[in-house]
């Protein structure tokens, strides 16, 4: 099993770094690292921790997932992060299947927020793309890059390895 997370904190500089440090420390709790941990409850506790320990204008998005290779299952909690995109390889082509949005709101904003865990089966050749809002919101001053263009670019480069796709300027 492999687990990883991607997060984004509001702001810049020392206050944002301190918030990220607080989150990083909380992510070592057993509920996040134990195979049988309760991730929705852990996200709710992290939300309450951020509410108690940070200023009102500080918040964070977070996408946590765990891949169980034996069961071919990806379990995840999306706490207000840009929903990752799962593309499936069908008949040699990558096609959009779903956005992994199951979870809840950003962390550190709403007292008493609840979170849910999503689950999706992953097959050989599927591609999971996780980005920050900086990728889809990047633009030329007139138009954002957007999710549609991101998916199109990934499909164009889908035969490459993950580093190859990144080297093509997509990550």
Image (cartoon, rainbow, N blue to C red):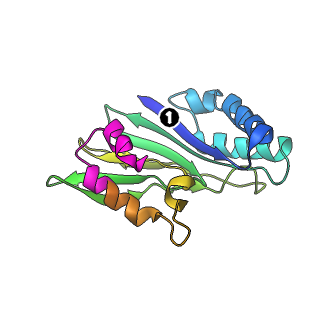
* Residue 50 x %, y %: 78, 44
Residue drawn at (28%, 55%), measured in percent from left and top?
155
Quadrant in the picture for residue 150: bottom left
Instruction: Residue at 56%, 54% (x, y): give it.
Output: 134
Say which residue appears at 81% left-offset and 54% top-offset: 57
On the question of residue 96 being in view, the answer is yes
In the picture, which quadrant includes the N terminus?
Answer: top left
Question: x and y percent of residue 108 in the render?
Answer: 75, 50
Q: Quadrant of residue 14?
A: top right
| Residue 67, quarter of the rendered image | top left
Segment colored magenta: 154-171
Residue 134 falls inside the magenta stretch = no
Q: Nearer the viewer, residue 100 or 158?
A: 158
Considering the whole magenta stretch, tell me its main secondary structure.
Answer: helix
Relative height, residue 101 to residue 28 (above, below): below
Residue at 14% of width from left, 55% of height from top? 91
């Amino acid at each position: 099993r492999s687990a990883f997370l991607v997060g984004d904190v509001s702001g810049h500089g020392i206050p944002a770094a301190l918030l990220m440090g607080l989150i990083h420390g909380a992510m070592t709790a057993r509920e996040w690292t134990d195979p049988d941990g309760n991730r929705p409850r852990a996200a709710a506790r992290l939300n309450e921790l951020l509410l108690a320990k940070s200023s009102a204008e500080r918040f964070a998005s977070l996408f946590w997932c765990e891949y169980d290779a034996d069961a071919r299952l990806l379990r995840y909690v999306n706490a207000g992060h840009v929903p990752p995109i799962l593309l499936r390889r069908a008949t040699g082509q990558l096609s959009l299947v779903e956005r992994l949005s199951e979870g809840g709101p950003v962390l550190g904003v709403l007292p008493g927020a609840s979170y849910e865990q999503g689950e999706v089966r992953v097959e050989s050749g599927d591609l999971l793309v996780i980005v920050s809002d900086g990728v889809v919101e990047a633009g030329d001053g007139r138009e954002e890059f957007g999710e549609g263009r991101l998916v199109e670019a990934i499909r164009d480069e889908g035969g490459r390895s993950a580093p190859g796709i990144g080297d093509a300027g997509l990550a």
